[in-house]
Image (cartoon, rainbow, N blue to C red):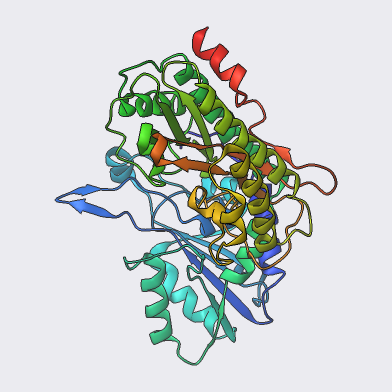
Amino acid sequence: MKYHQIDRDLFIKNRAKFMGQMKPKSAAIFNSNDIYPISADSTMPFAQHRDIFYLSGVDQEESILLLFPDAPYEHQREILFLKETNDHIAVWEGEKLTKERALAVSGIKTVYWLQEFEKILFELMTHSDTIYINTNEHYRATVETETREARFVKWWKEKYPAHAVAKSNPILQRIRSVKESEELDLIQQACNITEKGFRRILSFVKPNVMEYEIEAEFIHEFIRNRSKGFAYTPIIGSGNNANVLHYIENNQQCKAGDLILLDVGAEYANYSSDMTRTIPVSGKFSDRQKAVYNAVLNVKNEATKMLVPGTIWKQYHIEVGKIMTSELLGLGLIDKADVQNENPDWPAYKKYFMHGTSHHMGLDTHDYGILTEPMQANMVFTVEPGIYIPAEGFGIRLEDDVVIQETGAPFNLMRNIPIEVDEIESLMHS
């Protein structure tokens, strides 16, 4: 791994939180992700399943975590199963976790090789009544490929049909959404790397540069700072490309006078950052561009103030919509008649700002969190309003990542990333 080893105390705490909410005489099982094939002998880069990483720190394929707090013997209460390493694997693939190294990473004392899993599982099933299975219930999830976790669930249900089934996801949705201090430090590190990438491109961008060249500058800076790369597929949208919300082609030339919308974030140690900035290709905003930019910035700043304990996500977005409506009226993009005659299910402001303002962030860019429950301290949210004007050939979105505090304003993890018009123009001309 490129990142520095994480203190195993984080994973010990995470497991304790999860096991504290399990039913009596129950066990929970978590699997690594597959390495997904492309064609021939090519594969996608491995990306660990966030749940097993959150609970163990193990960041390699073919790993299983078993938690059984009511097991008869202490050594059976936390167990890791790993792919057995050997000299051949070390030569061809690089060193995998040994049992000793797994203890250092996870704090789990009992480690077996994978080939022992079925035998040990059978023994533990005789002492348990319920098994927690791990299904993906994220509100934005679309899963078309059978995962390693899904194959395991299918196998386990056939093998042990008499056991009761519980879901691990509701527990994880709650505990993963509230970050430990170590997690906040890791997300801050991801944001710091993103800042370095953004400052790099401010001196690089000029008329006629290609969007993919900007993407290349970001990835260069990310990897040289111990990131695996982008936390999500980057959006480098110049001119009207910014009005395509998930534009990822990044293959057009950036023309003088245009704006570039940059929705880019580095990952660090599997934790995400999520930044959006909009900058002028020529290094200076026009008066109209500046007016729209400052309107978006004002919405972002006002929306951020609302991210406090007790806030309900749905009501928060209604309030942000009111602020955006005021800004759009000031810009002349909508008028009072538009507002008076608006459809409550699709308010007038949605013509120019059609997406949500905030989402949970952490190990996943769109992280776990139950949106119907009140916000809590130490949750991390993005704040990302935008105004998109195809008729004028540009769109502007601004986004920071903030931590909800017990009292007072949220803490901005991207506080050092330039965002004011004057600072951006100054840095682009320095």
Q: Is residue 185 left or right of residue 386?
A: right
Count of marks overlaid on the render: 0
Picture coordinates of residue 117 (x, y %)? 44, 69
Q: Nearer the viewer, residue 59 or 105?
A: 59
Residue pushed farthest front? 337
User: Is residue 381 visible from the viewing direction of this image?
Assistant: no
Q: Nearer the viewer, residue 244 or 177?
A: 244
Residue pushed farthest top? 430
Q: Nearer the viewer, residue 394 or 305?
A: 394
Residue plotted at (55% across, 67% down): 345
Picture coordinates of residue 344 (x, y %)? 59, 66
Residue pushed farthest right? 407
Q: Is residue 110 left or right of residue 217?
A: right
> In the rendered image of this protein, does residue 90 appear above or below residue 348?
above
Q: Nearer the viewer, residue 404 or 397?
A: 397
Picture coordinates of residue 13 (x, y %)? 70, 55
Residue pushed farthest bottom? 162
> In the rendered image of this protein, does residue 337 appear above or below residue 87?
below
Residue plotted at (58% across, 29% down): 291
Residue plotted at (67% across, 36% down): 298
Residue plotted at (57% across, 62% down): 341
Picture coordinates of residue 239 (x, y %)? 37, 31
User: Is residue 340 visible from the viewing direction of this image?
Assistant: yes
> In the rendered image of this protein, does residue 30 appear above or below residue 220?
below
